[in-house]
Image (cartoon, rainbow, N blue to C red):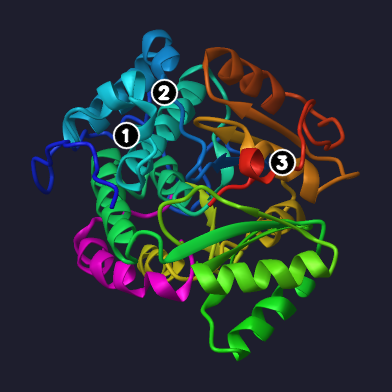
Amino acid sequence: MDRPHPVADPGPGAGRVTPDPVSAPTGASAPTGTGVPTGSDPSFAALFPGQGSQAVGMARALYDASPAARAALDAAEMALPGLLELMWRGPAETLQLTANQQPALVAAGAAAYAAYLEAGGPPARYVAGHSLGEFTALVATGALAIGDAVRLVRARGEAMQTAVPEGEGAMAAILKLGRHEVEAAVDAVRAEGLVVDVANLNAPQQTVISGSAAGVAAASERLKSAGGRAVPLKVSAPFHCRLMRPAADALRPHLAIVELRPFAARLVANVTAEVVEDPEAERGLLLEQVTAPVRWVETLERLHALGVRRFVEFGSGSVLTGLVGRTLVGGDALALAAADPDGVAAAVRATARPTPAPSTAPEGATDDAQEEATA
């Protein structure tokens, strides 16, 4: 069983910074109370990645270059002492543990967005995050303080890690087949009494399945016979499936007491792929998200239908940037990643453009599921 890096938790309320260093950096507009920040760009959505995007050294350049990013990261460190050391020095095998990479990714994404606002970028009208990234999106909206967020996802990661004994669960990315073909195979395997669910709808021809090792193996064989490609994912637990119910139960008391403030941007939730405006409704969706599939294709399509044409991925990596290109191919959407000072500067320039360039997968992008799939 994976053991998280020993980071002390000083208890509820520690690490709280007022105003929050992410949602209200120097020069940022105040929330209007309507879910639409003053001066926000209705064609711009901020995206925040989930597990698998972590890397040793993440957000270090932002810490050195941006006072706003530094404030966000210092707040995360105050809440979970030792977090920055782990992010910047690793080792990688410790950082990748579920209970560690979740707070690390929240901290990195929040820091990148804070740096972007500090540099003069217009606030996002819409935000969305892939699985874990939805917590970072809440930090960006001002609904969740970063100190509370990293402690909450630490508890989430620990609960997910211990929900299923090591080796009993599995996940696999299914490529070259559409959603309905994958769902049909999953239904057939479940009818045989095995446990498997659709976990992530990442792109039109990239769907992740999750469940028992036997269930995922059986569904993978069916899908390979149908012409698909099944790539096992290197994960420590079967996320976003019914086997995660103990994790949802463990997370419930933590979610019940955390403070969620009114949103200063419009959040599109993973579970519904719809805009959520009520913080209390979002509390329930975060709990449901633990066992429900991530509807990322529908999330991007919803944002596009709402008028979003600029998608910026804030945090470590560029997985979501590639998924925008695969989902909205041939459209008029621009996608880029802001993981370091150069990326933040590019995001500020891109969000100032009147007309985005057409959406394409980023140069060098492939369908290699282990590199591009996110759990």
Horizontal relation, residue 129 to residue 91: left or right: right
Residue marked by disc 1? 94
- Secondary structure at badge 2 equals loop
Q: What stretch is highlighted in magenta?
A: 239-263
CB contact under 8 Å: marks 2 and 3: no
Judged from the image, the secondary structure of the residue bearing numbered disc 1 is: helix
Residue 150 is drawn in which quadrant? top left
Can residue 28 be seen in this snapshot?
no
Q: How crowded is mark 2: few (under 14 residues within 10 Å), some or many (20 or more)?
A: many
Real-space CA distance between mark 2 and mark 1, rounded to the nearest whole angstrom: 10 Å
Q: Is residue 345 above or below residue 328?
A: above
Q: Which amino acid does label 2 sit on?
A: Val
- Which numbered marker is on residue 56? 2
Residue 197 percent location from the top left of the image = 57, 73
Say whether residue 315 is visible: yes
Amino acid on which disc 3 is placed: Asp
Question: Real-space Cα distance between discs 2 and 3?
Answer: 21 Å
Q: Which amino acid does label 1 sit on?
A: Thr
Neighbour class for label 1 at 10 Å: few (<14), some, many (≥20)? some
**Residue 54 vs residue 125, the one in the foreground:** 54
Where residue 245 appears, as percent x and y from the top left, is 36, 74
Residue 51 drawn at (x, y percent): 47, 45
Say what secondary structure mark 3 lies in.
loop
Mark 2 vs mark 1: which is more N-terminal? Answer: 2
Residue in the picture at 65% in, 41% down: 372
Task: Check disc 3 and report the residue beneath it.
Answer: 368
Give the mark nearest the N terminus, 2 or 3. 2
